[in-house]
Image (cartoon, rainbow, N blue to C red):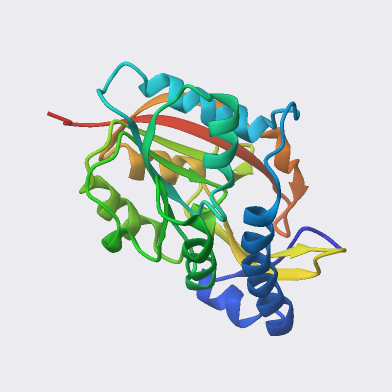
Amino acid sequence: MNRYSGNYKSIHDAMENCNKEAYEKMVTDLGRQVTDDFSSASQKNVKISETEAQIAMGIMSVSGSYSGGLRVLDFGGGSGVHYKRIMEICNNLQIDAWHVIEMPELVKAGNQHANGGALRFFESLDDADDNYHLILASGSLHYLDDPKGLFRKMSNIQHLKLIINRLPIMHPNNVKYTSDMYCIQNVGNPHNWQFPIRVCALNIWMEMLSETHEFRSFWDCQFDGAHPLPNGRTAISVGLLLDKKNNT
């Protein structure tokens, strides 16, 4: 089974063509995974994944630009796994807030287990605070129906840096595409999930981001691999580090 199938008009259109049982299984499994993550003992001396290393790079890029503890808004942060791993890696780092925006099922499970402290879960940007040092969106923005609307909301939140990581884009990425591509993402055994996904046109996203942010760094995310698309292109994943404009 190919990782990406179909060529649809929108995220909504792709959702209509997903196998509903496979989609609902994904939501249920992720909610259960949150509980499992909190019940698992903290691991020591484990290999740092590429994703955690890239997030740590973003945290280092903002260090020295603020006083007090670090405040992070983690959009699509699952069970808060990035927070837990960063705390293990950087055990001297003071974190005052690590706020995760997630689906309702994950938010409910997360807040049941987080027990207060820096890690908290919210269903919407509207529910979170309005001042952070870093906004992190790792493996999440390409599932949105309206990313431009989300960026308008993000631009109203005070922050210094924005990390977008594991963003699937169409390759070659030096082409001026006229639109993103909408597909169904298939995740086989043992998960057997299906969900709608947007494979992004990098030129469109960079234009959208440049309205509120300045580009700093760009990297490849080998973690997700390269996969053929139904239109003959290839999907690869990238990361971006950006500065928020007009922070004063």
Q: Which image quarter is the C terminus in?
A: top left
Which residue is situated farthest in the left direction here?
248
Residue 68 location, quadrant? top left
Residue 214 rendering spot, x and y as whole percentages: 31, 29
Residue 159 rendering spot, x and y as whole percentages: 27, 36
Residue 187 location, quadrant? bottom right
Residue 32 rendering spot, x and y as whole percentages: 67, 68
Task: Please tell me how many numbered marks the rendered image carries.
Answer: 0
Residue shown at the point (46%, 27%) measured from the top left: 58
Left or right, 176 with respect to 208, comes to right
Residue shown at the point (56%, 55%) measured from the top left: 78
Residue 174 seen: no
Residue 201 seen: yes
Residue shown at the point (34%, 45%) measured from the top left: 208
Residue 118 location, quadrant? top left
Left or right, 143 with respect to 191, comes to left
Against 209, residue 27 (above or below) is below
Comparing 5 with 100, the one in front is 100
Q: Which image quarter is the N terminus in?
A: bottom right
Comparing 70 with 132, the one in front is 70
Residue shown at the point (22%, 49%) measured from the top left: 130
Against 152, residue 245 (above or below) is above
Against 216, residue 104 (above or below) is below
Comparing 136 with 240, the one in front is 136
